[in-house]
Amino acid sequence: MSFPKSGNMLPSQRHGKPRKPSFARLVSTALRASLKGQSSKVKTVALWTGANERTVKNWLSGERAPSGDHFLGLAANCPAVLAAFLAAIQRNDCLVMADIEEARAKVAAALMALEAVRAAQLGTAAALSRDDG
């Protein structure tokens, strides 16, 4: 059997353009980069998504892509997955907004920690003044 006269170019050879990475590879790369150095990658991702560990191993290897619901869990818990997805669909405007929201959340957490330290110091100072008086 031979190729027909038209349409015999394979997808990776069309117009000399490099192939974009598959969705599975995109998720795999983002997850591995985000969880680099963490010993329990599979368990962490399984907790984020509710998927079983074998499924998560397939995602990390790039052999399979997550379903829509699982992808939502990944994007919600792993900023690298969200950033890779937004970059792949060329929505850099949303990427900037995601960075702003992440920075905002970190500032809010830092303010809460500072308030806790301040309250502890005020409580200690009040207790010391009662003991002296």
Image: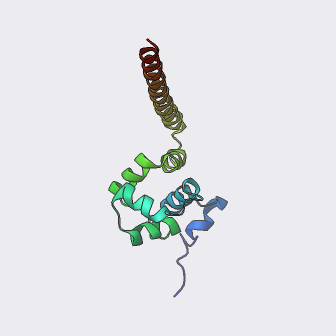
Front-lying residue, 42 or 69 = 42
Q: Is residue 121 above or below residue 89?
A: above
Q: Position of residue 6 (x, y in %)?
A: 54, 70
Front-lying residue, 121 or 46 = 121
Please state, as top left, top right, bottom left or bottom right, where the C terminus lies in the image.
top left
* Picture mark count: 0
Q: Is residue 94 above or below residue 114?
A: below
Q: Is residue 118 above or below residue 69?
A: above
Front-lying residue, 46 or 19 = 46
| Residue pictured at 50% horizontal, 33% vertical | 106
Q: Farthest residue toward the bottom?
A: 1
Q: Quadrant of residue 116?
A: top left
| Residue pictured at 54% horizontal, 56% vertical | 35
Q: Farthest residue toward the right?
A: 16
Position of 103 with respect to 45 (left or right) is right
Q: Position of residue 123 (x, y in %)?
A: 42, 22
Front-lying residue, 121 or 23 = 121
Q: Farthest residue toward the top?
A: 133
Q: Position of residue 64 (x, y in %)?
A: 45, 68
Q: How was the colour assigned to the protein in this rendering?
A: rainbow
